[in-house]
Image (tube, coloured by chain):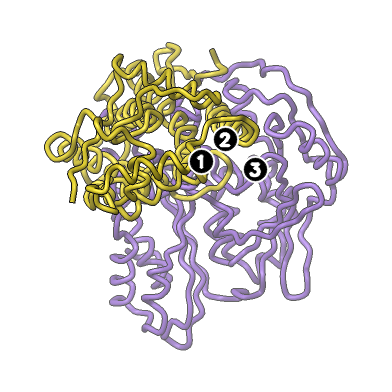
Amino acid sequence: MNLFFTWGRSPWGQQILQHISWDLFWASLFAGLAFFVAHASYMYLSPHRKRKAEETDAMEAARPDLPPKIVRHGGVARLFHWVMAAAMFTLLLTAFLPIVGIRFAWVAWHWTAGLVLAASILFHIVHASFWLDFKSIWVGPSDLPEMKAEILRELGHDVPGPKPGKYPLGNRLYHMAIVVAGLAVVASGLLMMKRVRTPLFTRDPYLLSDSTWGLTYVTHGLAGVALVGLVIAHIYFAIRPEKRWITRSMIFGRITRREYLEHHDPDRWVVSGR
Amino acid sequence: MAVIRDVMPAFELFQPASIPDAQALLARYGGNAWVLAGGLDSMDWLKDRIKRPQAVIDLSGIAALRGIRARGEDLEIGAMTTLTELVNHPMVRERFAILTEAAEAAASPQIRNQGTIGGNVSQDTRCWYYRAGWSCYRASGNICYADTPQAINREHAILEADRCVAVNPSDTAPALIALDAQMVVRNGEKERVVPAEDYFIGPSIDITRMTVLQPGDLLTAIRIPATWAGARYYFEKIRDRNVWDFALVSVASAMVADADTIQRMRVVVNGVAARPLRLRAVEEAVRGKPRNEETAKAAAELAIEGAQPLKFNAYKVPLMRNLVKRAIRGTEVA
């Protein structure tokens, strides 16, 4: 078990869980980079299907009612995304640079970024619940046909199966993983702030029992190293040529009519005409 | 307190005769090597079986690490020079009396005969929670047992605490920083010279180490430039008993004054944080000021800004304030 966790000894001589083994950070970093290489190689070498330009031309000609630019992400949603991204980068850098030997006073930066992340997530939950199509980002059993069609397309088959609504299946699966890892890291991190001196809370190292603190630190560590791999995958997809239209939309907010018709099912993501 | 046991855990003992031999051993064993200087800190750790190194590298047989040499106007002190040799050296006594005074304040005559300057500056903290082998932050755990509501923390930090509240126990460290000493560190073929001020690190930078020394590093010498030679020095160490005790708070200062005006000054306190603290704000504040009660009082108030005492060490705040005041006045009257 020492491969994954670090154990210590309490003042009463009991063995207590402390945190994850930092080898897991390297494992996550390696996994993220291995995914990057494997996927890039596959995309370069495989016969995955790309829609012919004539097909999209025909779709575009059939929908002249659509505006030439379609809003995919509003300003508030984009602001949230980039604030969260900055907080996440700060958190990962302040957490893991000291582990790789770059020493600096990281704790205050870390919890400050953590609070920014927590606040932005809270804002996002409220914003998505009341102002956005909350269900459009989630995945469920009803998405299995789409998943099957997406896999077949990736394997080079020309299948007519369902296309995504507002968010591609990969986006939705990634969002699900980020929700799990992000909420775990924020919840455990907020608890851990009770163990360090901050101007916000009265420090209370005895808030939880030793074993519960151990589980909290392990949860924080596991979620943190998972986020390393997830962030690498996210950046990789953001810079892939065939995904740049999504990245552009996260910067400028809009996609073209052609991109809308090419990548989305207009029945699942309904855009009103001009 | 930890129970001292008679039998140390097994380790390989190496007694190299040269610096390259010692470095080769350090390179071979990396983080599993333990560098033994005078052994006064080391034996506690080993007998308590808290530290269990694979190899102990005893530096006592390396002649090149001993002795005090003049380098032009500067002075070079081998890391294995004992505190007694340092105290008795005429050149140190004549030009850098503050170092003599600080070294003489360390422990007891027997310990100074055995203890080295390199060991004195590189020793680990005396926090007994940590030294008892509990899994605290400094021991790679996730709690500081000294910073809890029930903790006995009379000797702990009032400044720069960052999760860990341990303090640096070295007597010579503040004097060396006041003298702008340079620490010569070798690792393999590489040699780097680190200002004494940067040699010591606090928990915010690395919670498991007191100095910049990494596995493989060897402190070989300490160089003292002539910059502060013959300055007005002040050193005072406050402790519970007058011999064989660690400082509760200590202060070391070097001052160049023209008549009664302070031209430049270095003030360093120890025992209040995990590293000896150079009080730059105080140094700036007193530059060009008359050396009088008013300046001393203002500087002393500035020195304790930001102090956050624990349950049992609030006394360190007025103690530090008074020591800084005395350092500026150069007298022991509070």
Residue B273 spot, x, y in % from top left: 42, 49
| Up/down of B90 relative to B108, above or below | below
> What percent of the width, then of the height, locates residue A92?
44, 41
Badges 1 and 2, same chain: yes
Tell me the residue that label 1 is attached to.
A236
Q: Which residue corresponds to mark 3?
A: B214
Are tags 1 and 3 found on a single chain? no
Measuring from the top left, give residue B193's x and y in whole percent. 69, 60
Q: Nearer the viewer, mark 2 or mark 3?
A: 2
Residue at the limit of the structure toward the bottom, as seen here: B259
Please tell me whether mark 3 sits on a helix, a strand or a loop.
Answer: loop
Please state which amino acid type lies under the numbered disc 2: Phe
Q: Residues within 10 Å of mark 1 (few under 14, many from 20)?
A: some
From the image, state the color of chain A: yellow
Considering only order in the chain, which callout, 2 or 1, is on the residue closer to the N terminus?
Answer: 2
Q: The chain shown in purple is which?
A: B
- Residue beneath label 2, please? A36
Q: Quadrant of the N terminus of chain B?
A: top left
Q: Is residue A59 left or right of residue B244?
A: left
**Camera sees residue A66:** yes
